[in-house]
Image (cartoon, grey):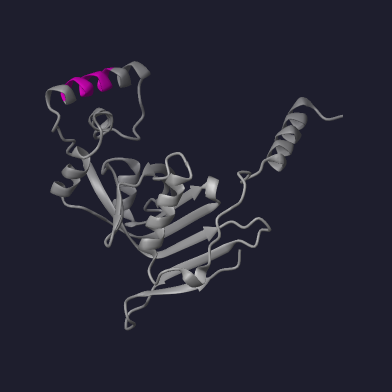
Amino acid sequence: MHGTGDEAAEEFRELLRGLRVHDAGELPAFDPEQAPDEPLSLFRRWLREAAEAGVPGPHTMMLATADADGRPSVRTVMLHDVDARGWHFGTHRTSRKGRELAARPYAALGFHWTAVGRQVRIGGRVTAADPEESTADLRGRSPAALTAALAGGGRQSEVLGSYEELERAFEAARERVEREPDATAPSWTLYVLAADEVEFYQEEEHRRHVRLRYRRAGEGEDGGWRRELLWP
């Protein structure tokens, strides 16, 4: 006879087996033969279509970094922009991810848009923008985002003594934003990931999923992108 712990574990496994990743009707078609020669325009189109399909927070993404010993960590951040330089996101350079990027300037991004059955994976080298661009990035965000940046400036990912301490820091930051709407957080940094690999993944109802990967051409080649299909 199984104990309570075994029964709970089996119930949890049954829950996982019964879950479905996608149950929202017909999935969009994706013909890789019609994909553009470079990934930027396709990414912009997929994000726009995810937003139009009602995906909540389509600009949120997973950011994976690693410390000096190679131990990985992952968290959810927001995409601030994407252009010819790469994918932009912001954080405090004193945070865990900021410190890890200083030690190992490479990262991976992941987007998952369940309503349309799509994923995008991106990997490449990360560089920090200059202070002027980082300040402009912070000032372009909402007052609430600025308040959070000021409240946690220099302390993000550190141990918090009590929730009351956090409340006091936010109240002080909120008052400062009201007095100084152009206030800045010195540690705030805009980062840009220059992709050397971008993979687009489209689910298909019979699990014949489509995976299209773009990879930067090597040195001595044309400097463009190679496209290749992957087994799902």
| Front in this rendered view, residue 174 or 118 | 118
| Front in this rendered view, residue 112 or 29 | 29
Outermost residue on the right side: it is: 1
**87 up-or-down from 155: above or below:** below
Please say whether residue 119 is visible from this viewpoint: yes
Where is residue 218? Give x, y as percent: 36, 78
Where is residue 172? Give x, y as percent: 21, 20
- The magenta stretch is 168-176
Where is residue 195? Give x, y as percent: 36, 62
Outermost residue on the bottom side: it is: 220
**35 up-or-down from 182: above or below:** below
Quarter location, residue 153: top left
Quarter location, residue 127: bottom left
Where is residue 81? Give x, y as percent: 29, 50
Query: Split into 4 quadrants, where in the image is the N terminus?
Result: top right
Q: Main secondary structure of the magenta part?
A: helix
Q: Residue at x 41, y 53 (%)?
A: 69
